[in-house]
Amino acid sequence: MPETSGWTGRTPETHVIDFRAAERLLAARDPRGAVKLLDPVIAAHPENTAARLLRARAFFAAAQLRPAELEFTIVLEREPDNAFAHYALARTYERQRRPEQATRHFRLAAALDPNPRYLEAARFDDSQS
């Protein structure tokens, strides 16, 4: 039910608590629980890129690939130099069997950060695409 008075009973402090609890839920392999905690945080703070990135990771872990793709894309619109977001979006595309998009973002991740995991996924020594 939508809140019409503007008061949701949530404060910035409770949003931080929910964010931290969502991190713990994701680490404990409860991505759906993490999403439930993050939804009101993002509703109240849609500009919060860290919350969106965490929700994207939770969607990915829950195999909700379209919502994960959307969230990773929003993060990258705001932070185009976020190597992890490129890598995670590439993994999302990979799971959706969209190899061309995956390769592009794997390579962007590796170009932004020479993390060995990103470099391996980028497969620069493969085809010249």
Image (cartoon, rainbow, N blue to C red):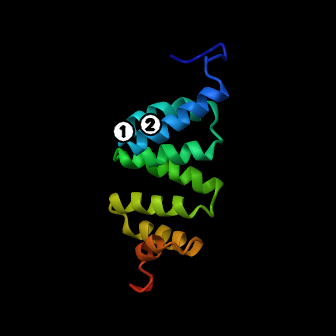
The residue lying at 62 percent from left, 55 percent from top is 77
The residue lying at 60 percent from left, 26 percent from top is 14
Residue 22 position in % (x across, y down): 48, 37
**Amino acid residing under circle 1:** Asp
Judge left or right: residue 97 versus residue 13: left
Q: CA distance from mark 2 to mark 1?
A: 6 Å
**Amino acid residing under circle 2:** Ala
Question: Does the CB distance between marks 2 and 1 fall below 8 Å?
Answer: yes
At numbered mark 2, what does the secondary structure look like: helix, strand or loop?
Answer: helix
The residue lying at 44 percent from left, 63 percent from top is 90
Q: Quadrant of residue 8?
A: top right
Residue 56 position in % (x across, y down): 48, 47
Quick one: quadrant of the C terminus? bottom left
Q: Residues within 10 Å of mark 2 (few under 14, many from 20)?
A: many
**Residue 58 or residue 89, whichever sits in front:** 58
Q: Quadrant of residue 99?
A: bottom left
Q: Is residue 5 above or below residue 16?
A: above
State how many labels appear: 2
Question: Of the numbered discs in the image, which one, if any, rests on residue 34?
Answer: 2
Judge left or right: residue 120 versus residue 40: left
Residue 83 position in % (x across, y down): 56, 64
Q: Quadrant of residue 27?
A: top left
Residue on which the image places disc 1? 30
The residue lying at 37 percent from left, 45 percent from top is 64
At numbered mark 1, what does the secondary structure look like: helix, strand or loop?
Answer: loop
**Outermost residue toward the top?**
5
Question: Of the numbered discs in the image, which one, if any, rests on residue 80?
Answer: none
